[in-house]
Image: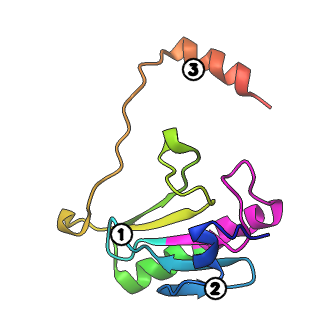
Amino acid sequence: MKDENCIFCKLANGDIPTNTIYEDDYFRIILDADPVSLGHALILPKNHYKNIYELGDEEAERIMPLAKKMAIHMTEVLGCDGFNILQNNNEVAGQSVFHFHMHLIPRYKDAANNKGLLTFTHPGITADEIKDLAKRLKM
C-alpha cells in the first residue's frame, strides 16, 4: 500500500529520482539529501507505514538484518570509525517525515565529517525508580 501524498513513498518506489545504494522487493536505501555525515543513508519501506507502531511484521523482520548488512558494507567501503542506526517515531522523538524510515549514519573520528553528534540528557531517575519501572514494563 502506497500513500500518493507521501514524498517517501515516491522516493521508495522510484517515482522521484534518488541516489539509490540498495533495493529489493521491500525496501529502497537512498543517500540522504541533507546528510549529517558522509554516507548518511535512509532505509525506506516501499509500503507506507507512518511509524514503527504501524510497520508491517514482514518488514519489521527484514529491516534489522538489512541494516546490519548495510552497516558492515558501508563501514568497509567508507572506512568510518563507528555507526549509528537511528529510527524516530512521532514528532517529539524527532520524526519529521511520517513514513517509517531508518537512518544509517556512518561516524568518523574527524568531527569535520559530522554535522552533529547524538546527545541525550540523563533524566535524573533513581535506582529505585528504575526498579519500579522495570516491574511496570516487564512482559
**Height in image: 21 above or below 75?**
below
* Picture coordinates of residue 13, whole percent (x, y): 66, 81
Whether residue 39 appears in magenta in the rendering, the answer is no
Label 2 element class = strand
Of residues 19 and 83, the one nearer the viewer is 19
Residue type beneath disc 1? Asp
Q: Residues within 10 Å of mark 3 (few under 14, many from 20)?
A: few
Looking at the rendering, the stretch of residues picked out in magenta corresponds to 42-68
Q: Nearer the viewer, mark 1 or mark 2?
A: 1
Give the residue displayed 26% in from the left and 61% down from the top.
115
Asked if the residues shown at circle 3 and circle 1 are in contact, with their CB atoms under 8 angstroms apart, the answer is no
Q: Nearer the viewer, mark 3 or mark 2?
A: 2
Q: Quadrant of the C terminus?
A: top right
Q: Which residue is mark 1?
A: 34
Label 3 element class = helix
**Gap between marks 3 and 2 measured at Cα:** 41 Å
Q: Which residue is mark 2?
A: 23
Of residues 121 and 97, the one nearer the viewer is 97
* Picture coordinates of residue 42, whole percent (x, y): 52, 70
Residue type beneath disc 3? Ile
Give the residue displayed 56% in from the left and 63% down from the top.
102
| Pointer 3 or 2: first along the chain | 2
Q: Which residue is mark 3?
A: 130
* Picture coordinates of residue 52, whole percent (x, y): 68, 52
